[in-house]
Image (tube, rainbow, N blue to C red):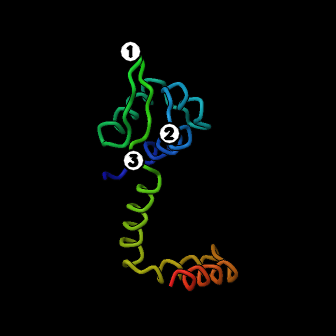
Amino acid sequence: MEKLTNKEEEIMHILWKLEKAFVKDVLAEIKSDKPHYNTLSTIIRNLEEKGYVSYNAYGKTHQYYPIVSKEDYKKKFMNLAIDHYFNNSYKNMVSFFAKEEKISVDELKEIIELIEKNN
């Protein structure tokens, strides 16, 4: 699974949300920095070449849909991020968010409870 550019990832989030969409539907969902229709069409075709989307053809029009799930993408790239930025240590990752005050003590307690329930 190839890493996506930021714009490709943004488009994938829209496709995961819509499940099936024509280029015009995706364009309507983009809130800021709307690309030109042809540019967006090229981005979606690149996603197809990378194996992330497929399409149903209706004459000259294509309706695109994701073939990589959001969950599979998240697992792959979260694991890569943890490996690259936290030396493959979930402890280092949680410590980072605690130091940055992005996670509360109550949230950490909930995580501990979840871990204990699964063991």
**Are the two marked residues, 3 and 2, in contact with CB atoms closer than 8 angstroms?**
no
Q: Which residue is mark 2?
A: 15
Residue 65 visible here: yes
User: How far, Cα to Cα, is label 2 from label 1?
Assistant: 20 Å
Residue 57 figure quarter? top left
First along the sequence among labels 3 and 2: 2
Give the residue type at disc 2.
Leu
Going 60% across and 76% down the picture, which residue do you hit?
Answer: 100
Label 3 and label 2: CA atoms lie apart by 10 Å
Counting from the top left corner in percent of width and height, residue 101 is at: 64, 77
Pick the residue in front: 66 or 36.
66
Q: Regarding mark 3 in the picture, which secondary structure is present there?
A: loop
Q: Residue placed at 51% from the left, 38% from the top?
A: 19
Which residue carries the number 3 mark?
68
Question: In the image, is residue 15 above or below residue 22?
Answer: below
Residue 84 image-quadrant placement: bottom left
**Which residue is the extreme one toward the right?**
106
Please provide percent x and percent y for residue 40: 45, 30
The residue identified by callout 1 is 60
| Residue 99 seen anywhere in this rendered image of the structure | no
* Mark 2 nearby-residue class (10 Å; few <14, some 14–19, many ≥20): many
The amino acid type of the residue labelled 1 equals: Lys
Residue 9 in picture, x, y percent from top left: 45, 47
Q: Is residue 50 above or below residue 71?
A: above
Of pointers 2 and 1, the one earlier in the residue sequence:
2
